[in-house]
Image: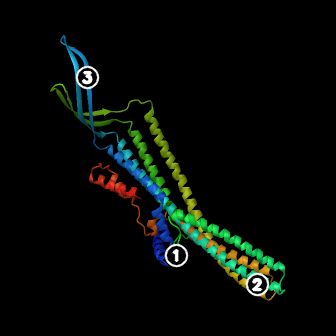
């Protein structure tokens, strides 16, 4: 059931992207536009992409330990003193320069380097999942910022319209006071309501300005004309469905599982380090004497076999430490599993609650409007006081504000539920962005290309391009 649902919401997400991307006006900005801008603008994503590239380099560095290691060396020595050979004294005064090359190849190390290489690869995969988690966070912030601006803009407009209405009510109360139909108390009540409306408008405008600042930080530019999305991605019908998808798809779960695998390889590497090591060693050197034509040219080839016997218990401690870290990762998976299930359940419950609130506030607005219109007409006939009208008007205003908030909460909760399941990504939502490919850099560096090689030159171009971001 979970897999069938996952396929169905993928189709629903494509529909969402197409529906939201379609511009309403030339200057309008859709939710999909805002999410795409946030993805391209985010410094947090850039930071974590760099951390992923750093993890990629750990693979390259470990792989390099399996390759031939070639070094050059050189020295120059000045010798002075006396020597006696066969009762003949000899003055020593000469320069001895030497230069050479050395070569070392790892033949066998009990599998320690191979295990370290596999651990580095698993760490890269885990770091990729961490990057996906950051992507979800960036996109959810974009949704929250976008909907906050829409909500607060609508509430400001609501407060402004209400203020105009209260001003008309005040004018009507003053006119009726002048002809003796109402008392000064009715005028004061209208004046009080007008002052309260101005205060509410000022508060709403302040909230809007804060939401606009949040939008600028999350999206990367000031909000323009925002269009509330009409179609939302499909979400689970039950809480258990949401939890099932989350356990299988959420990047935190996958990251934790991959971290366990990396830790297990680290245990293997620590145990293998206690075994023997065989290397092939070779060198060639030339040494000459500036004072005469004497020189020495030497070449060596050989195998070196060795291994630890006793190092004060350090190697055993490293094995135990690696095991402890592996056990810690296993314990963390237990925590992450429960947290992921809880977050998915909470997100699903929040969405259901938001839907119920939206339905209730819609009925509340309808009833409050009917009541207000009726009370206002009755007031004209003298059956209702100015206070009755103002109270009814405030109830209608509060109901409309609640409906606006409920609409925002429903949309935000929908995307929060996607995030809790690990599906709030540019790929799943089919956003029109240039997606960062985490494998591209890895494929270039995984086998440690030399600086002047063809791939080394490609890497230089990539790094220069990244430096301009």
Q: Quadrant of the C terminus?
A: bottom left
- Tag 1: Cα neighbours inside 10 Å, few (<14), some, or many (≥20)? some
Asked whether the beta carbons under mark 2 and mark 1 sit within 8 Å of each other, the answer is: no
Q: Residue at x 42, y 30 (%)?
A: 311
Q: Give how far across and how far down residue 139 sits, in percent.
A: 50, 64
Q: Nearer the viewer, mark 2 or mark 1?
A: 2
Q: Which residue is mark 3?
A: 79
Q: Which residue is mark 1?
A: 231
Q: Give how far across and how far down residue 121 sits, in percent.
A: 39, 51
Note whether 313 is above or below 249 in the view shown: above
Q: Earlier in the sequence, mark 1 or mark 3?
A: 3
Instruction: Give the spatial CA distance, label 2 vs label 1.
Output: 43 Å
Q: Is disc 3 placed on a helix, strand or loop?
A: strand
Q: Earlier in the sequence, mark 3 or mark 2?
A: 3
Q: Nearer the viewer, mark 1 or mark 3?
A: 3
Which residue is nearer to you in this view: 186 or 454? Answer: 186
Is residue 269 rendered to the left or right of residue 76? right
Instruction: Give the spatial CA distance, label 1 vs label 3.
Output: 87 Å
Q: Is disc 1 placed on a helix, strand or loop?
A: loop
Q: Residue at x 35, y 48 (%)?
A: 60
Q: Residue at x 50, y 69 (%)?
A: 34
Q: Which residue is mark 2?
A: 172
Instruction: Give the spatial CA distance, label 3 vs label 2.
Output: 113 Å
Q: Give how far across and how far down residue 432 sits, in percent.
A: 43, 70
Which residue is nearer to you in this view: 90 or 346? Answer: 90
Asked whether the beta carbons under mark 1 and mark 3 sit within 8 Å of each other, the answer is: no
Which residue is nearer to you in this view: 310 or 24? Answer: 24
Q: What colouring method underlies this structural image?
A: rainbow
Q: Quadrant of residue 313?
A: top left
């Amino acid at each position: 059931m979970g897999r069938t649902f996952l396929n169905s919401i993928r189709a629903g997400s494509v529909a969402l992207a197409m529906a939201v991307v379609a511009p309403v006006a030339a200057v309008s900005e859709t939710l999909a536009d805002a999410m795409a801008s946030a993805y391209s603008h985010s410094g947090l994503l850039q930071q974590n992409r760099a951390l992923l590239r750093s993890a990629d380099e750990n693979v390259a560095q470990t792989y390099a330990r399996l390759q031939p290691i070639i070094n050059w060396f050189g020295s120059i020595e000045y010798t002075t003193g006396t020597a006696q050979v066969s009762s003949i004294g000899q003055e020593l005064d000469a320069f001895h320069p030497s230069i050479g090359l050395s070569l070392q190849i790892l033949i066998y190390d009990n599998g320690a380097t191979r295990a370290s290489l596999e651990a580095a690869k698993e760490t890269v995969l885990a770091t990729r999942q961490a990057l996906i988690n950051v992507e979800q966070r960036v996109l959810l912030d974009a949704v929250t910022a976008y909907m906050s601006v829409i909500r607060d803009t609508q509430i400001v407009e609501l407060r402004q319209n209400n203020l105009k209405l209260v001003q008309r009510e005040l004018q009507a109360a003053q006119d009726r006071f002048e002809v003796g139909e109402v008392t000064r108390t009715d005028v004061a009540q209208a004046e009080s309501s007008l002052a309260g409306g101005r205060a509410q408008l000022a508060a709403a405008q302040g909230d809007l300005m804060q939401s606009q600042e949040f939008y600028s930080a999350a999206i990367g530019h000031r909000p323009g004309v925002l269009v509330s999305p009409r179609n939302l991605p499909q979400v689970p019908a039950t809480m258990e469905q949401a939890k099932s998808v989350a356990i299988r798809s959420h990047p935190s779960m996958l990251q934790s599982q991959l971290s366990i695998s990396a830790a297990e390889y680290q245990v293997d590497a620590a145990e293998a380090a206690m075994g023997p090591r065989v290397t092939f060693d070779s060198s060639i050197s030339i040494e000459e004497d500036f004072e005469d034509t004497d020189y020495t040219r030497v070449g060596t080839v050989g195998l070196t076999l060795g291994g630890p016997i006793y190092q004060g218990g350090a190697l055993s401690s490293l094995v135990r430490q690696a095991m402890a870290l592996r056990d810690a990762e296993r314990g963390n998976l237990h925590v992450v599993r429960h947290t992921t299930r809880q977050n998915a359940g909470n997100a699903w419950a929040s969405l259901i609650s938001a839907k119920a609130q939206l339905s209730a506030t819609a009925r509340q607005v309808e009833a409050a409007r009917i009541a207000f219109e009726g009370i206002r007409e009755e007031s004209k006939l003298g059956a209702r006081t100015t206070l009755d009208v103002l109270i009814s008007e405030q109830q209608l205003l509060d109901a409309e504000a609640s409906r606006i908030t409920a609409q925002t909460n429903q949309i935000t909760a929908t995307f929060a539920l996607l995030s809790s399941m690990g599906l709030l990504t540019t790929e799943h939502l089919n956003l029109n962005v240039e997606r960062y490919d985490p494998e591209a850099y890895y494929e270039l560096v995984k086998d440690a290309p030399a600086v002047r090689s063809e791939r080394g030159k490609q890497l230089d171009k990539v790094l220069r391009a990244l430096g301009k971001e």
